[in-house]
Image (cartoon, coloured by chain):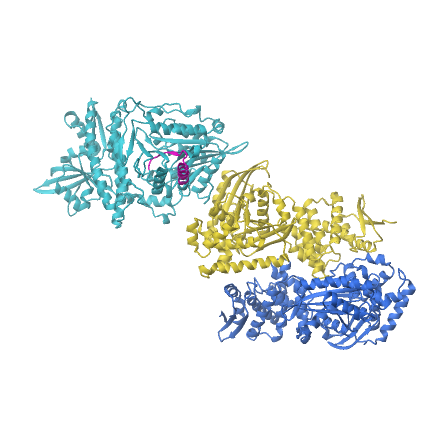
Chain colours: A cyan, B yellow, C blue
């Protein structure tokens, strides 16, 4: 192990979130987009605490003190995380202050002084919208400290009555809108907690309001399902949902103005460590900036028009077209609407026998779900494999799963113990020459909403061999079979990682033999130890490795004797880089794969993921175009130097290349 | 059915398998291959019946398979066959009924010999030049959980065919109580006894050249060795054997990455393989990569065939005859005459090639019972014929052959008629037609001296005349014919007459 | 036993043929390894010229050299060559014997007609339950015929008369085909000669040995479509008469066409047949048995006796049955070693348990038969072989067993594996209650014994049965690892425990 070096995934993740945050100060980013990055940073961090940090707490509670691969005990790690997170939150505050000043110049006032005309409006908002919803709890022997739900903002109020100090808590109701935009000659954005805070005397008649402080708790929210008992996953998750709100506290965000005694009081009643406390300026929880960001389209990225390539239309001849060649789509530059239309067409086509699909996160009002239900009503066999354990989406998932079942679809919930991450659609059609299977493999979810933000590859082919393997995959997911043969597709957890390792080994062999050996890997995370070690070996053997890793990266880059032949970059842009594309020189064979799997242990071992080899030469060229454009990016790319990321800037005289901008509106894909 | 979609479900002792294929002018496209492990065999071989829990699990799996049929709109073009795991269970009809009620799938139990035969045909159609193996000598073994089925062919003759209770799971269950480090020795001793049986049955050395195996064990070995070629070499099997023989199933499972069910039977299975190689005297076990469901699918959709089957059947029957010291020249001429008369009377009997083959078989075997005793030799012939086992001949066909040899002799008693009456009318009629012909043919060599040189069948509107030319006066034949011709008239409603002419006159 | 496994050879130089039989002495019995036969026809010249001519000697030596080669090949421990009538009638026999000794390295005993008769008698005893009959054993050779009268197993008298068929043919038959006159003359002569022997009227069994009669029965068996390769065949007198009539009207060339006719006997066979017919006429017999290889088997047995031991049947008539069982076993290619081992173990168990199981000592006879034959059904097919065994047992002539006993044997064999006796089984239901009980008890013993030789390797050398009040202990004696045997015994002992009502424990 000493020959290898790993970077801790939490630390690496925080670095990633920092890169997100830094977008908010990139001068090339439109102003309101900066607000979005600030919001993303916050929402990312919330999730990080709820799950990752909570996980470290679990380890400590379990008296687990073995060092991880990067050499940290859980306790040490927690310290490091706290330190980094505190620094980042401080930076975020700074950037936020700076950004809202700029916004003010563009007549968008966030956190305005409330006076004059504004104060009347705010008062009436309080009276009409807010007051009926809130119920303050004033602490006393009869009223103990209430349970504060995860991520719920509270106002902690210090009162006085008859010379006695009282504390009271207002938990801001979930159904209360977070921000009110008041359009006068400028747009004022006021948060609900601010409105409440200034109206406190109204809330506590007969008391003197001494002061009030914002408070927000983050709790352990990792949803662990007892796999063995998962007889009926659906029922289990429904039961489990309420309990998620009751986890241990892992972070406390508290108003900067709160005095020590308040902190002590809270600590005594809630129970948390000092290092979990994040003292922040108001407002807490910047995710509300998402809803501010639509205030002026001109301050956003100019709208881009996705288009349907190849002159395809989902009309009655579409299946003949699909048989002619393989098609590769690149969202969001290509219009995902075609894909939804294709499913709709399949639902209506008389020759279609069956439709099978994996659904991970469906958007609300998904047309895909509608199409599937319709197909089932028309007597086609529709099989939907639903992944219920996608974090935080459970409630939504359960709802439409029932809807599909009611329509007569065969709905299954995957394999106990394995999350289903592969994204497949299979249309089986009876044609005069025989059965034809149309396979659709994707790196992204069949989600019409996220398709606009995430970049992803969709691949459609009528290739029989691929059809067979897609069919295998569905059979596996639906429990129709336990074994299958794979050639074009490798599937985790059984064969994906070994396939990757053997492909890397092949490069190593060639490198050692003095032959050309190179690989380009575009993924979102790299943390799998075995793969990292293999990459170290490859680097030492002289394989040229270029990696584009958006998020967590557990490996150093360019370190002599370790990773000197490895370059790693991360691209953070307006779209979330999401496809996994992997290229191997393979002795001149140039093999190309798209995949759903990040290179993390959990993806390799406890999820159903796929790695699909593209053999069509046009499609391979397309993938290479994406990879080389990514590698050329000098405006949105960060390079990893050792353990530190550095943002690239065009050298003097060098042309700017922004890979995402490059693809917008570009007629690629032939 | 030749073109279109065809599905096969195979319920084995350790797994349920399904395959759907699309056939187009002899070209097969495998659409689906499904495998669901469920150890019905474990229930059956240890308890004698399938537990309720397993029945429900089986039904669930079949419900899923039913979905697959629906997916392709397959209504009738499927076969759902059960092998030993169901076949040997006391409550098999309960399972069949339960599945029928819950899924609408009709399960059929397949005879062991049919099962092996289908596998055999699969291998035969897959291995190039297999037909020459049948000449040079090949041992085909199917090692399953319950039984080891062995079929030895040589000179286009099936010289041994049998299902022996030495399946890997059976062995494993048998020696459960013996400590792991010495269990392999018990397997070793036990498997050896299997070869005693084969040897005593073969009655002397027959040189065999090739060893071909099938069964789920082949899959396990393929997984372990991942061979590029279609055979395993002795040395690799021996090495593996040494490595695993005294380890626990858990250890072997982990070390080899195989399923626990496979690991459990690995050692007895390897033992069997190695002993088979020793027996044949070869270093190679050949196999086919075609799965059983695939073979079933192709077989039931009439997309594979057994070239040379009739020839092999004929050879095998003569081989059997020699084993029982039959009068070969007599059997030969009776066979010739039977077939000749059968062919000449096509319009009269309306029977097909299958019946012709059965007649030929019966003609070869009709006197075989003499070996047991001359008295009641027809009964003995019947008994031996009933026990005849050759892959490719089903129980129904064997039954007909047995009845033909039983009835070839005039003066069969009441019990013959009683036994015959259990068969359905159509079969009875077929038997009567064929017996009528066989009797005439047998009569033409009553003396067993092959006095008749040539036979002509003259079909006239009111009678059939058999014109025989003989080397000398054949008094016995004339006598025999008069005794044996009555049934012909009863069956066909037309008399048959013998016209004999001595050649030298 | 001493001499176990050694090979012996007997050579019979007859008037017509030289025959060799190589046997291996084994377990109080012997097994024929190889047989050889060459037609030399010394008799032709001897009976004409009174001596063995140069040409005849050469033919003899050619044949005996081949005999020598075969003997060497088998590493024979003892060679016994005997010459019969042809030498006895040759004036130069001692020179011939010297010549043979010089060339072939073994001497030739010239034996008397009485000795010939005795050997034939020994052979007949091994094949027939001669103790029950008043039998005539007739050996028709080329030069002489040996008549032995055996009364209830005891040799009453023996005659050697010059009625060999070569001799008779030479003397009486000159034409081809035989003229009526020649035939009638020979017939009258034979009737007269036979009458001279004053054979007892009470003779109820005629056993013929010698090649010519053997050939005659073979011809008959073939004619009616039966297997002719049996040691013992039966020929009814009416068939004999029919054969005689057939043959007498044919030329020798035509006779050769008869299926089964040995070419070199075609001329002399008539005389042999006519002699036997004359004997049947005299004794009022309805038919005859032929016994092939009589002289040679007798010689072999005698040779073994001379080595210092008797074969079982010679002291105990029960073992005639036993040899017949072995013969049937061999016919169906049984695994003799396993069969004998199972029988041995069954015997031990039977001896130790028969009172426990309510069996009589005499029941051993049927259990023995079932033990020896339990696996013969394998000949038909392995699957259901226990049922096939039953079928074959019930349809093979087990000599010396009654009808009921044969059904019992069949049942015991049938229950040696798979299901225990059930009322629904036809042949079991046929038996009386007590018969059923005994079948169950004996099949239980057989099962256990079979289990104890599961490896078919005779690993259990011996066993002891200890009957205790609540259990039966079985102590196995062996130099080998018996795990398989013990395992199988555990699985097969259930029936035995059920019937004895005691727990069975292997020690």
Q: Where A137 falls versus C366 (above or below)?
A: above
Quadrant in which the C terminus of chain A is drawn: top left
Q: Which residues are magenta?
A: A500-525
Quarter of the rendering containing residue B350: top right
Which of these two is toward me, B39 or A14? A14
Q: Residue A57 in the image: state x and y as whole percent.
A: 25, 46
Where's residue B354, x and y in %? 67, 46
Residue A512 part of the magenta-drawn span: yes
Q: Is residue A605 left or right of residue C449?
A: left
Q: Is residue A474 left or right of residue C354?
A: left
Residue occupying the far front of the picture: C102
Q: Please give left or right for residue B65 compared with residue A364 in the image.
A: right
At a point 47% along the width and 46% down the height, the residue shown is: B223
**Is residue A271 in view from this perspective?**
yes
Residue A595, picture quadrant = top left
Residue furthest toward the left?
Answer: A163
**Residue A122: where, in percent of width, then height?**
18, 29
Q: Is residue A284 visible?
A: no
**Residue in the foreground of this view, choosing between A51 and C298:** C298
Q: Residue furthest right?
A: C181
Q: Image check: B461 left or right of A170?
A: right
In the image, residue A71 sits, relative to residue B386, either above or below, namely above
Residue C454 percent across, percent down from the top left:
55, 63
Quadrant including the N terminus of chain A: top left
């Amino acid at each position: 192990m000493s020959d290898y070096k790993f970077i801790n995934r939490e630390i690496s993740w925080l670095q990633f979130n920092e890169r997100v945050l830094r977008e908010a100060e990139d001068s090339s980013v439109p102003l309101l987009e900066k607000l979005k990055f600030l919001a993303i940073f916050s929402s990312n961090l919330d999730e990080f605490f709820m799950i990752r940090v909570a996980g470290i707490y679990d380890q400590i509670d379990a008296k687990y003190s073995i060092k991880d691969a990067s050499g940290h005990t859980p306790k040490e790690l927690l310290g490091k995380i706290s330190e980094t997170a505190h620094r980042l939150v401080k930076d975020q505050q700074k950037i936020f202050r700076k950004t809202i000043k700029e916004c003010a110049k563009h007549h968008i006032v966030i956190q305005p002084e409330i006076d004059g005309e504004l104060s009347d409006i705010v008062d009436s908002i309080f009276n009409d919208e807010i007051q009926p919803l809130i119920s303050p709890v004033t602490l006393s022997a009869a009223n103990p400290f209430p349970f504060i739900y995860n991520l719920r903002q509270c106002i902690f109020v210090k009162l006085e009555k008859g010379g006695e100090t009282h504390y009271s808590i207002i938990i801001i109701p979930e159904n209360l809108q977070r921000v009110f935009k008041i359009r006068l000659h400028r747009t004022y954005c006021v948060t609900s907690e601010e409105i409440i805070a200034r109206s406190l005397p109204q809330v506590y008649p007969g008391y003197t309001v001494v002061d009030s402080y914002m408070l927000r708790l983050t709790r352990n929210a990792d949803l662990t399902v007892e796999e063995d008992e998962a007889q009926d996953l659906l029922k289990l998750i429904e039961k489990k949902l309420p309990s998620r709100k009751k986890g241990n506290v892992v972070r406390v965000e508290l108003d900067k103005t709160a005095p020590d005694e308040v902190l002590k009081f809270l600590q005594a009643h809630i129970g948390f460590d000092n290092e979990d406390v994040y003292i922040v300026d108001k407002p807490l929880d910047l995710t509300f900036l998402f809803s501010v960001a639509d205030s002026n389209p001109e301050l956003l990225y100019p709208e881009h028009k996705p288009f349907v390539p190849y002159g395809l239309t989902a009309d009655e001849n579409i299946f003949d077209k699909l048989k002619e060649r393989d098609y590769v789509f690149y969202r969001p530059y290509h219009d995902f609407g075609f894909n939804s239309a294709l499913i709709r067409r399949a639902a209506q086509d008389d020759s279609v026998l069956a439709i099978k699909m994996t659904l991970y996160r469906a958007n609300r009002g998904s047309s895909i779900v509608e199409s599937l239900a319709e197909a089932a009503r028309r007597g086609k066999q529709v099989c939907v494999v639903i992944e219920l354990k996608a974090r935080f989406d459970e409630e939504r998932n359960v709802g439409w799963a029932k809807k599909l079942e009611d329509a007569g679809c065969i709905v299954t919930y995957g394999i106990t113990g394995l999350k289903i991450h592969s994204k497949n659609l299979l249309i089986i059609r009876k044609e005069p020459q025989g059965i034809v299977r149309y396979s659709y493999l994707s790196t992204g979810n069949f989600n019409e909403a996220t398709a606009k933000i995430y970049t992803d590859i969709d691949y459609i082919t009528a290739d029989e061999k691929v059809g067979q393997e897609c069919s295998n995959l569905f059979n596996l997911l639906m429990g129709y079979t336990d074994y299958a043969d794979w050639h074009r597709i490798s599937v985790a957890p059984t064969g994906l990682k070994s396939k990757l390792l053997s492909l890397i080994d092949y490069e190593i062999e060639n490198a050692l033999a003095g032959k050309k050996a190179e690989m380009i890997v575009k993924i979102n995370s790299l943390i799998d130890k075995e793969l990292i070690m293999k990459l170290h070996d490859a680097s030492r053997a002289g394989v040229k490795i270029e990696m584009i890793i958006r998020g967590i990266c557990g490996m150093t880059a360019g370190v002599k004797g370790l990773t000197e032949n490895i370059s790693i970059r991360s691209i953070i842009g307006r779209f979330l880089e999401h496809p996994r594309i992997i290229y191997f020189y393979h002795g001149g064979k140039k093999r190309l794969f798209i995949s759903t799997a990040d290179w993390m242990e959990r993806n390799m071992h406890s999820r159903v993921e796929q790695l699909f080899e593209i053999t069509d030469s046009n499609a391979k060229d397309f993938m290479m175009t994406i990879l080389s454009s990514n590698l050329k990016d000098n405006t949105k790319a960060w390079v990893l130097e050792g353990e530190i990321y550095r943002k690239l800037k065009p050298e003097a005289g060098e042309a700017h290349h922004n890979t995402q901008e490059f693809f917008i509106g570009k007629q690629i894909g032939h | 059915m030749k073109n279109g979609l065809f599905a096969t479900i195979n319920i084995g002792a350790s797994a349920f398998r399904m395959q759907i294929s699309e056939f187009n002018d002899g070209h097969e496209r495998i659409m689906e291959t499904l495998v669901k492990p469920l150890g019905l065999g474990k229930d059956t071989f240890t308890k004698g019946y399938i537990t309720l829990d397993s029945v429900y699990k089986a039904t669930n799996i079949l419900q899923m398979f039913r979905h697959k049929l629906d997916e392709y709109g397959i209504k009738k073009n499927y076969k759902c066959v059960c092998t030993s795991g169901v076949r040997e269970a006391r409550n098999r009809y309960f399972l069949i009924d339960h599945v029928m009620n819950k899924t609408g799938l009709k399960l059929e139990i397949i005879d062991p010999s049919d099962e092996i035969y289908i596998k055999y045909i699969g291998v035969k159609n897959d291995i190039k030049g297999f037909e020459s193996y049948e000449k040079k000598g090949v041992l085909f073994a199917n090692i399953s959980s319950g039984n080891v089925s062995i079929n030895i062919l040589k000179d286009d003759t099936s010289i041994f065919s049998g299902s022996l209770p030495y399946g890997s799971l059976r062995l494993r269950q048998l020696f459960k109580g013996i400590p792991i480090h010495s269990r392999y020795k018990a397997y070793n001793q036990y498997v050896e006894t299997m070869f005693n049986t084969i040897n005593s049955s073969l009655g002397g050395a027959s040189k065999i050249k090739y060893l071909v195996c099938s069964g789920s064990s082949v899959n396990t070995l393929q997984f372990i060795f991942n061979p590029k070629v279609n055979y395993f070499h002795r040395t690799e099997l021996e090495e593996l054997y040494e490595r695993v023989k005294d380890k626990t199933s858990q250890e072997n499972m982990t070390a080899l990455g195989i399923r626990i069910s496979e690991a459990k039977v690995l050692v007895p299975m390897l033992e069997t393989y190695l002993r088979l190689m020793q027996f044949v005297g070869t270093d190679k076990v050949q196999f086919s990569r075609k799965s059983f469901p695939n073979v079933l699918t192709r077989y039931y959709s009439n997309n594979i065939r057994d070239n040379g089957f009739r020839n092999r059947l004929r050879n095998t029957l003569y081989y059997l005859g020699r084993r029982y010291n039959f009068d070969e020249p007599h059997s030969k001429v009776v066979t010739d005459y039977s077939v000749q008369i059968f062919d000449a009377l096509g319009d009269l009997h309306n029977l097909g090639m299958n019946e012709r083959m059965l007649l030929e078989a019966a003609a070869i075997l009709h006197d075989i019972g003499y070996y047991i005793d001359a008295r009641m030799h027809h009964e003995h012939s019947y008994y031996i014929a009933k026990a005849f086992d050759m892959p490719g001949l089903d129980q129904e066909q064997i039954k007909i052959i047995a009845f033909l040899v039983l009835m070839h002799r005039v003066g069969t008693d009441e019990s013959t008629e009683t036994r015959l009456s259990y068969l359905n009318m159509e079969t009875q009629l077929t038997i009567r037609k064929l017996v009528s012909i066989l009797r005439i043919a047998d009569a033409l060599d009553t003396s067993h001296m092959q006095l008749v040189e040539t036979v002509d069948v003259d079909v006239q509107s009111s009678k059939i005349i058999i014109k025989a030319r003989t080397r000398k006066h054949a008094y016995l034949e004339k006598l025999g014919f008069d005794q044996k011709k009555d049934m012909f008239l009863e069956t066909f409603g037309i008399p048959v007459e013998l016209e004999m002419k001595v050649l030298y006159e | 036993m001493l001499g176990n496994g050694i090979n012996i050879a007997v050579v019979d130089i007859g008037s017509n043929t030289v025959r060799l039989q190589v046997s291996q002495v084994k377990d109080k019995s012997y097994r024929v390894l190889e047989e050889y036969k060459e037609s030399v026809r010394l008799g032709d010249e001897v009976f004409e010229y009174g001596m063995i001519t140069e040409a005849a000697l050469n033919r003899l030596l050619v044949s005996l050299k081949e005999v020598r080669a075969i003997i060497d090949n088998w590493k024979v421990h003892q060679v016994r060559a005997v010459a019969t009538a042809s030498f006895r009638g040759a004036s130069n026999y001692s020179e011939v014997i010297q010549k043979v000794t010089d060339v072939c390295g073994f001497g030739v005993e010239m034996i008397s007609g009485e000795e010939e008769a005795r050997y034939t008698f020994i052979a007949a005893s091994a094949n027939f339950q001669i103790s029950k009959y008043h039998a005539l054993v007739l050996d028709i050779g080329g030069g002489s015929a040996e008549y032995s009268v055996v009364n209830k197993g005891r040799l009453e008298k023996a005659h050697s008369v010059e009625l060999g068929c070569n001799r008779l043919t030479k003397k009486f038959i000159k034409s081809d085909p035989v003229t009526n006159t020649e035939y009638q003359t020979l017939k009258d002569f034979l009737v007269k000669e036979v009458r001279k022997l004053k054979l007892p009227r009470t003779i109820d069994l005629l056993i013929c040995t010698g090649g010519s009669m053997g050939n005659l029965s073979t011809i008959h068996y073939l004619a009616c479509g039966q297997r002719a390769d049996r040691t013992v065949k039966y020929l009814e007198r009416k068939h004999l008469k029919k054969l005689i009539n057939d043959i007498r009207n044919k030329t020798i060339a035509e006779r050769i066409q008869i299926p089964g006719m040995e070419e070199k006997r075609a001329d002399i066979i008539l005389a042999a047949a006519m002699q036997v017919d004359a004997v049947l006429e005299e004794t009022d017999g309805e038919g005859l048995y032929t016994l092939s290889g009589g002289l040679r088997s007798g010689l072999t047995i005698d040779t073994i006796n001379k080595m210092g031991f008797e074969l079982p049947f010679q002291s105990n008539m029960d073992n005639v049955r036993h040899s017949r069982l072995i013969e049937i076993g061999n016919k169906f290619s049984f695994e003799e070693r396993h069969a004998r081992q199972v029988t041995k173990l069954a015997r031990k168990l039977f001896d130790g348990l028969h009172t426990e199981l309510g069996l009589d000592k005499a029941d051993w006879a049927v259990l023995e038969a079932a033990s020896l034959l339990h696996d013969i059904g394998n000949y038909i097919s392995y699957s259901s072989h226990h049922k096939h065994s039953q079928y074959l047992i019930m349809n093979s002539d087990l000599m010396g067993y009654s009808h009921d006993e044969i059904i019992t044997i069949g049942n015991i064999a049938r229950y040696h594996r798979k299901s225990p006796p059930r009322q629904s089984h036809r042949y079991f239901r046929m038996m009386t209650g007590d018969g059923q009980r005994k079948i169950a008890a004996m099949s239980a013993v057989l099962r256990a014994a079979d289990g104890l030789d599961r490896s078919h390797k005779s690993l259990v050398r011996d066993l002891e049965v200890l009957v205790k009040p609540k259990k039966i202990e079985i102590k196995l004696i062996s130099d080998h690892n018996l795990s398989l045997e013990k395992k199988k015994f555990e699985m097969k002992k259930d029936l035995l425990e059920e019937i004895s009502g005691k727990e069975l424990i292997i020690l």
